[in-house]
Amino acid sequence: MTISIGNDHAGPDYKNAIVNHLKDKGISVTNYGTDTLDSVDYPDFVHPVAKDVSNNKVTFGILICGSANGVAMTANKYKNIRAALCWSSEIAEVTRLHNNANILCIPARFTSIPQAVKMVDVFLETEFEGGRHQNRIDKIYCAE
């Protein structure tokens, strides 16, 4: 399994905890996030993660910002991306089970680091159910 991760200034501590956790589990991580608290523009860190996932360069993506709304909106502009804003492990599980989400978006200002790490584990360990859910996913993308 391979992961791309990105974050803005709200998430360096979260990113570092998640990266260390994943590496301890033997998971390869590509880090596109900032390491400082200096204000940055979150799209600059989303685009490389979304491209990696969209192009099947990695298995999953993880994005972190203050509310996770901006990173989710940006990532979801890419074809074949289903970025899910999650604030609990239960929501992270359902986004994989029912939506086959491929990018986990974590709101650093609304979750703790231990919650975020648990969400990552649940997200990565949960398999998509398929079936009726695939029919719904097939209706997501707009062709214009």
Image (cartoon, grey):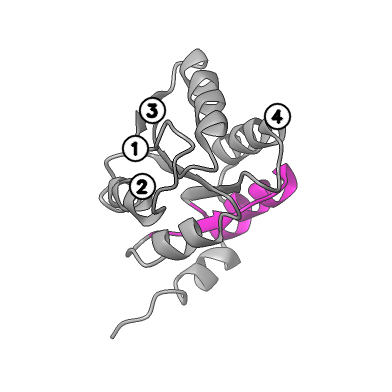
> Does dot 4 land on a helix, a strand or a loop?
helix
Tell me which numbered mark, 2 or 3, is placed earlier along the sequence. 3
The C terminus lies in quadrant: bottom left
Per the image, the residue denoted by label 4 is 114
Pointer 2: what residue? Answer: 45
Point out the frontmost of discs 2 and 3: 2
Q: Nearer the viewer, mark 2 or mark 4?
A: 2
Image: magenta residue range: 81-101
Q: What is the x, y in percent for residue 2? A: 37, 31
Q: Are marks 1 and 4 in contact (CB under 8 Å)?
A: no
Residue at numbered disc 1: 32
Residue 58: name its quadrant: top left
Is 10 on the left or on the right of 53, as rendered? Answer: right
First in sequence: mark 2 vs mark 1:
1
Q: What residue is pinned by disc 3?
A: 29
Element on which disc 3 rests: strand
Q: CA distance from mark 2 to mark 3?
A: 14 Å
Which of marks 3 and 4 precedes in the sequence? 3
Image quadrant for the N terminus? top left
Labels 2 and 4: the sequence-earlier one: 2
Q: Give me the C-alpha separation between circle 1 and circle 3.
A: 10 Å
